[in-house]
Image (cartoon, grey):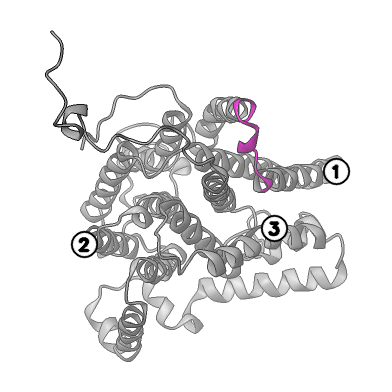
Amino acid sequence: MNHTRRLSWSDHSVGMLAFLALFPGFFFYHSLLGLGMTGAFLGGFFAPVSLLVVGPLCFLYAYRVRREARHLTRVDVLFFIYVAYFLSVIGVNAAAGANAVIVGHHILAALFTLNLFLIFRLTDFARSDFRFLAFVSLIGMSAIVFIFSVDGAFYLAPLGTAKNPESLATYQGFSRSYLVTFLAVAPLCKKRWLRVLLYCLGTATLFVNTARSEFAAMLFVIPIIELYYSKNKLLMLAIFIFIFVFLLFSREWLLEVLPHNRILELLDLSHSSSANKRHHLTMYAMNTIGKFPVFGDYGSYNPGFYSHNVLSAWVDTGLFGFLFVLALLILPAMQMLVKGYVAQVKDEKFILAFSMVCITLLLLATAHYFTDMLIGATLGAYSTYRYGRKNATNRPPHLGSPAPRHPHLRQAMPQAGRPRV
């Protein structure tokens, strides 16, 4: 198979290049920055690159919709309504004097979410060119993490080699790039040995990278993918239950064997300062919701001190925004679970979308802000799946003439005379 298919300026090519620039590109840029091999000529990288790619993505998406109106699905419409609602909330509160830093963060978050939606609508992640480049990127990112880790943890800031340390990404930024790239590759691998290889590589990388939320998300999605592809789901489920019980009863042994790492706090969150801080921020959000149950209280916290879960949507966008974002994610998850997860025919677009929605719901319930860009990626993947499923259902039957039963007429009529010269 030719993995290096010649690129053309198609919607897939632009979407693929945007994805590779925003995620593996972010990782490699900040690795070079942290190692002092380059300065922060693109600042934090993600915002300027997002501004660079949003124009071509919007143009190609609009061109595709104009060429084929069915490409604008109901999911697309609802997503754009949600983004418009969020931007209107930002605009109203900005005009009322809301914290400019929070307003700026929200505007960028809307841009990131839009970009991810368009990328997952335009890119065919099952194509060999994307899978090859993304797989190579994962290997490269893992190699950097392992080579430059210190005492079992990867974080470039303490090395002191960065020319612009204030622009260097945190471990969350590195882990986000890795997890999103992993999610775009692993669910589409139909060979089990290749998926297992990715699981081992990914869990080891995120463990060393010390990002607990992304590490837990990867562990969460592995059984979802394997149960989907497994022909004997009960046996596979039993295997995962056994592994979980083994790890549960081997907690003390794991603490002794594995290098000291904040990932191990997942075994006992009561001793985690970060988990305790998030609990207090959640209680503060619930107090705000109790005082302002309908409209919330936009930006009523210091920048960065938001509730690290979906309750943040209620605080900043009110009850309607909170219910809107939940409906956008829960309804597709339920629909796919009921109609597609146990289907006999395996669909790459389905498992990509289902893996994304499961991860997004988990992170919104436990660790991430409501502006998480994975919402856009999830809805883009789900819309692509729905479009493909509906298009396949509505495709007219083939009405052409049947193929001949014999490649040559004389095979069907051996008694015929000699052909004329």
Residue tagged 3:
325
Residue 193's tag is 2
Seen in the image, is 114 located left or right of residue 100?
Answer: left
- Residue 240 in which image quadrant: bottom left
Seen in the image, is 14 located left or right of residue 88?
Answer: left
Give the mark nearer the N terminus: 1 vs 2.
Answer: 1
Q: Secondary structure at mark 3?
A: helix
Q: Secondary structure at mark 1?
A: helix
Residue tagged 1:
92
Q: Residue 357 in the image: state x and y as whole percent.
A: 54, 60
Mark 2: which amino acid? Answer: Trp
Position of the C terminus, as image quadrant, is: top left
CA distance for labels 2 and 3: 36 Å
Give the magenta range: 65-74
Would you say residue 279 sits in the magenta stretch?
Answer: no
**Of residues 71 and 255, the one drawn nearer to the viewer in this rendering:** 71
Q: Residue 203 in the image: state x and y as whole percent.
A: 31, 64
Mark 3: which amino acid? Answer: Val
**Looking at the image, is mark 1 or mark 2 nearer the viewer?**
2
Q: Residue 185 in the image: state x and y as whole percent.
A: 35, 51
CA distance for labels 1 and 2: 52 Å
Which residue occupies 23% across, 60% down?
197
